[in-house]
Amino acid sequence: MTIRNLDDLLAEGVSGRRVLVRADLNVPLDKQTGAITDDGRIRAVLPTLTALTGAGAKVVVFSHLGRPKGAPDPQFSLRPVAARLGELLGAQVRFAEDTVGESARSTVDALADGEVALLENLRFNKGETSKDEAERGAFADQLAALGEAYVDDAFGAVHRKHASVFDVPARLPHVAGRLVLREVEVLAKLTGEPERPYVVVLGGSKVSDKLAVIEALLPKVDRLLIGGGMCFTFLKAQGHEVGTSLLEEEMVETCRNLLERADGKILLPVDVVAADAFAPDAAHDTVRSDAIPSHRLGLDIGPETVAGFAAALADAKTIFWNGPMGVFEMAAFANGTRGVAEAITKADAFSVVGGGDSAAAVRALGLDESSFGHISTGGGASLEYLEGKTLPGIAALED
Ligand code: 3PG
Ligand code: MG
């Protein structure tokens, strides 16, 4: 199986050609103001876009944003993203008010060589996410008609069997963009023969989201450190009471079973920061993880846990981290995530930060991005890759 990449397309010559670029510009927005709170995903696609514009292509970018329900919904408009993309490119980005309609066609027609257009949110169209092949295919036909070649640079969406990810490449010459290529190279290192010790840090709120990756990773890793909201279901499985902490009761048995099979590889918090309420100013204390008061909920891992996790990371040669250790958006509950992130940067290891929230946490906490080996733009996508699943967006690029 081979996947052609952007250099192959550039070698053919793209000057004056309409090139479609599927990007993942699904950036977090401030709930009140709608402002972009982290533009990492926009910046991540710039190398592909500038390579194409520099070669004189007419670049047509499309993306999803949020989860609108197949119809236009102003709160999920990509218009602010077009503005930010234009600032970062230092060039005007033409914005089409629909995805495959009159606005899209005239916007694409008006493109001069080396210019960029961004189409409105793909998910304003039912066909994009439809499970019905014919409905998805019909939408893909319309998308494909806008361009002459297709570049997938939307790593964060390669695990979705959506029209723009899976069906458009079947209709046009297709290549992987710079970002997708780099992401896949990095993750392939982790699934191949990672240098040891190989330590994985998992956080985030739900065990159920992470179960498949835990199953897949357990035989491969030397240590698996678990924090975040999901640790409480594991603590419960160890027989501890967790107060009003996040708990997936139906997963307790599964966690107990995982702990039994883990051969001591799984490390859980020994102390947690427990609060009266889920609020930035809630009263809180550090407590032993086997003594969480019944009226309190754990919102972060405690300092002794941070020290233990840091020790477990110190000699690592390969690290993968997905999911915050606590509610890092609230200063009182950010120390766990910060401490673990710092320990990762201190290790003399190849470190990969897996997507979405953890990448945003790195930037929100003001940590130096360059001290990590790689910061993935895909949360779900990187986890599914590590699970060994076939990713529809990658499969669609193979010839
Ligand atoms: C993400 O943020 O995880 C990607 O952009 C995919 O979005 P989705 O989970 O809504 O498909
Ligand atoms: Mg997601």
Image: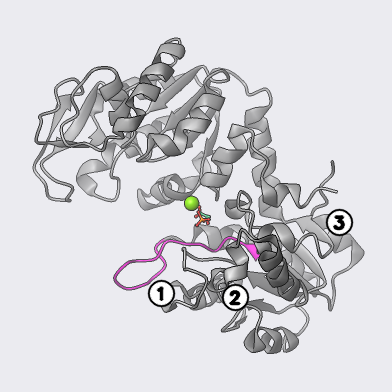
Q: Quadrant of residue 226?
A: top left
Q: Nearer the viewer, residue 79 or 146?
A: 146
Amino acid type at image mark 3: Asp
Q: Position of residue 343 (x, y in %)?
A: 40, 30
Q: CA distance from mark 3 to mark 2?
A: 26 Å
Residue identified by numbered label 3: 8
Would residue 204 be seen by someone viewing this image from the given angle?
A: yes
Which disc number belongs to residue 75?
1
Q: Relative to 24, is 378 above or below? A: above
Where does the magenta region start and end?
A: 22-37
Q: Relative to 343, is 178 above or below? A: below
Membership of 29 in magenta stretch: yes
Residue at 42 percent across and 36 percent down: it is 208
Is residue 207 found left or right of 187 in the rendered image? left
Is the stretch drawn in magenta largely helix, strand or loop? Answer: loop
Which disc number belongs to residue 90?
2
Q: Secondary structure at mark 2?
A: loop
Residue at 59 percent across and 75 percent down: it is 90
Q: Position of residue 50 (x, y in %)?
A: 70, 67
Q: CA distance from mark 3 to mark 1?
A: 38 Å
Disc 3 CB within 8 Å of nearest ligand 1 atom: no
Amino acid type at image mark 2: Gly
Q: Secondary structure at mark 1?
A: helix
Q: CA distance from mark 1 to mark 2?
A: 26 Å
Q: Secondary structure at mark 3?
A: helix
